[in-house]
Amino acid sequence: QRRSGKTSLLRHLGRRLSAEREVIYVSLDGHRIVDDDDLALALSPANLDDKRGLARRILADPATAKRVYLIDELAYLNTSDQTALGWLRQLWGKAGGVVLAGTPSDWWQLMERSGRVVPGSSFGNDLTREDVGALSKLHAIEFLIGNSGEDKRLDEAAALRIIERCGSWPYYLNVMGEAVLRTDGEIDEQAVDSAYEKALLHGASAIFKARWKELPTLIGNLLLAHPGARPDYYQLDRALRSKLRDVGLCTPAGQWLEDRPFYDWIERYACEEEI
């Protein structure tokens, strides 16, 4: 998920694995993936002009077994045909490892896509899904203090003010931590509030906008109709509850995930966007 800092996590994983494997990090952002050779070209470590037969050559290459593919932005697989999805399944059988990263909405759309282009496929069942969530309060404090700069450091009191304001998703903590460290003077409530409004809600508006655009219209309308509070999950119809789980807003147990910045952004800015 974007708020969990998925790209940073992939980069960190790549650094951990690089001593033993050839790590290939690829963002599919901007790639148009239709068939297996399109996907193979996007994942190729070399700049190639001719993609013909590339998918077959990668699977036949002995070096593939020593490679780990870290594939970001899996939303761009949603135009794939059965050859691309079938080749991806072959790749994770041949390679040293394959990790796909995206939002809950990306995952849900990819599962729908695979069901349409390969009816009856076990594509989703062959993957192990790991949901990356917010940090515990203790780990959030350690994250903020540990990532402080040398010239100015956050103490525990400042870290707690930040967590109280924005929650403990790593991306939010990173933006807020960097912003308050740039302020002059004491890191008090006023400094934290200013960072929240200017650096996070306004400065990171593109991130929130992207999440907003991903939401089905039904979900967007639901959130707009309940400013300041989420509706009772069990008062919603079954189909709507399923959608809320699919897009990562609610847990299977019917709890709304804490995400104050996103809901605050919706109240302040979503009215400017088309649903």
Image (cartoon, rainbow, N blue to C red):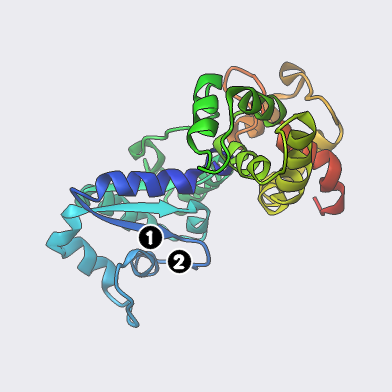
Quick check: marks 2 and 1 in contact, CB under 8 Å? yes
Q: Is residue 2 above or below residue 23?
A: above
Quadrant that contains the N terminus: top right
- The image shows residue 68 at horizontal and vertical percentages of 27, 51
Residue type, numbered disc 2: Val
Q: Nearer the viewer, residue 165 or 3?
A: 165
Marks 2 and 1 sit apart, C-alpha to C-alpha, by: 7 Å
- The residue located at (35%, 63%) in the rendering is 43
- The residue located at (38%, 60%) in the rendering is 84
Q: Within 10 Å of the Cα at label 2, are there few (<14), some (14-19), or many (20+) other Cα atoms?
A: some
Q: Nearer the viewer, residue 78 or 273?
A: 273
Give the image quarter of residue 127: top left
Residue 115 makes an appearance in the image = no
**Residue 272 left/right relative to 58:** right
Residue type, numbered disc 1: Ala
Q: Is residue 236 above or below residue 175?
A: above
Sequence-first disc among 2 and 1: 2
- The image shows residue 151 at horizontal and vertical percentages of 55, 43
- The image shows residue 183 at horizontal and vertical percentages of 71, 44
Q: Residue furthest left?
A: 62
Secondary structure at badge 2 equals loop
- The image shows residue 225 at horizontal and vertical percentages of 87, 33
Kindly identify which residue carries mark 1.
84
Give the image quarter of residue 61: bottom left
**Residue 25 left/right relative to 21:** right
Kindly identify which residue carries mark 2.
34
- The residue located at (50%, 68%) in the rendering is 32
Q: Is residue 86 above or below residue 215?
A: below
Q: Nearer the viewer, residue 179 or 229?
A: 179
Label ID, residue 115: none
**Residue 36 left/right relative to 103:** left
